Amino acid sequence: MDNFKFHVYTEIFFGKGEIKNLPATLSKYGKNILFAYGGGSIKKNGIYDKVMSLLSEKFNVVEFANIEPNPSLDSVKRGVELCRTHAIDVILAVGGGSVIDCTKAVAAAFYYEGDPWDLVLDSRKITKALPIVTVLTMAGTGSEMNRGSVISNKDQKLKLGMGAPTTLPQATFIDPTYLYSLPPMQTAAGAADTFSHVLESYFKKGEDAFIQDKMSEAVMLTVIKYAPIALKDPENYAARANLAWASSLALNGLTGNGKSGAWSVHSIEHELSAYYDLTHGVGLAIIIPAWMKHILNEQSVDRFVSMGVNVFKISDQLDKMEIAKKAIEAMEQFFTSLGIPMKLSEVGVDEEKFELMAEKAVKYGALKHAYVPMTKEDVIQIYQLCK
């Protein structure tokens, strides 16, 4: 196991009705609140009214609405301007990963005089950030309990990650009932995102990270068990609670620390959603089986066997390669069962930009350091398998 530093200071308020603690939590940081949210679904499901009722008497609330599903640099700049104009003390992000990601970039850029994109290109320039408090309305990204953020530069057709210790949310409210109104595809995409986070940690280099791998398997098993239940019965509290907590644990460092190397699937998918504005979780589900087929070989097969036997309950008496192939097939069948389209042609993506996207995936994703190192040609072949 590699050396690592682990420090996640996010205070979690988990469960029905815990939102009652929001005013006391925000008051630690000041009275001027930037209330960030997305396209307005929180106004339809009542979460907006609930939050405003808690804030209206004690705080000065400035609304930062219409953050896109793939948050853009333009939105970051808009948020920074609001923070500076209204002397914001703390940012309240109510939404899923896109909203939270955007506010992390805003929080860091508030203290930076240059172009916020500089911080995306080099997170070492982040020295300070406004405090962030989040209210989760979609499970999947894990952004509610980590420092990471992914921002899209539409002009440059780039979608890149950023983050620093100071962009970790101070507190997060996770009320499973707030996930009841999620559309089925968002539930499915979130499940695929959570699954992908631990899968990518599972397929990282590093010996003897037994406990990390077992935690990853536990998260995978949780998603497999509860995602179908949440789709069939959207107001099943146990399903929503388990999926929400799995989302947070999947990417807060517990499963990835102690294992070195780059992620592959996320880097390959980020290019898809940068060019085609594809839902991130959907793109991941499409890429994962193709990537697995591409990297399966005599050197990687044991990792597939572990996943096949421990997660998909395939008999360990079969030949290793047979177990591996059955595991990939089971993975693809699971995503299909969630109603996720499994071909790029089904989501409006053709071959036109395969070469360009592959080049950028390798350039920005450090894929030479992946579990199975990949070149531009490897990524093109993966895209081809997905078409």
Image (cartoon, rainbow, N blue to C red):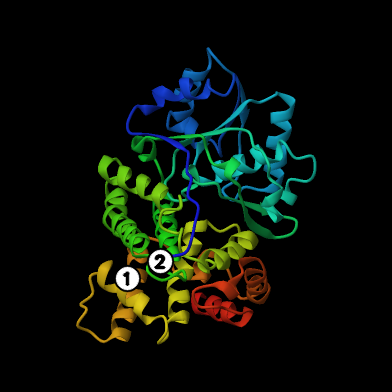
Name the residue located 44 percent from the left edge and 29 percent from the top edge: 47
Q: Is residue 251 above or below residue 172?
A: below
Residue drawn at x 73%, y 45% is 116
Judge whether 153 appears above or below 179 on screen.
below
Which residue position holds label 1?
307
Q: Which residue is mark 2?
A: 202
Labels 1 and 2 touching (C-beta < 8 A): yes
Which kind of residue does numbered mark 2 sit on?
Tyr
Element marked by disc 1 = helix
Residue 66: x %, y % from top left = 61, 38
The answer to whether one can see residue 2 in this image is yes
Q: Residue at x 37, y 60 (%)?
A: 212
- Report, in whole angstroms, how far the alpha carbon at label 1 lies from the one at label 2: 9 Å
In depth, the one of 159 and 164 nearer the eye is 164
Of the two numbered discs 1 and 2 on the same chain, state the one appearing first in sequence. 2
Quadrant in which the N terminus is drawn? bottom left
Residue 149: x %, y % from top left: 58, 49
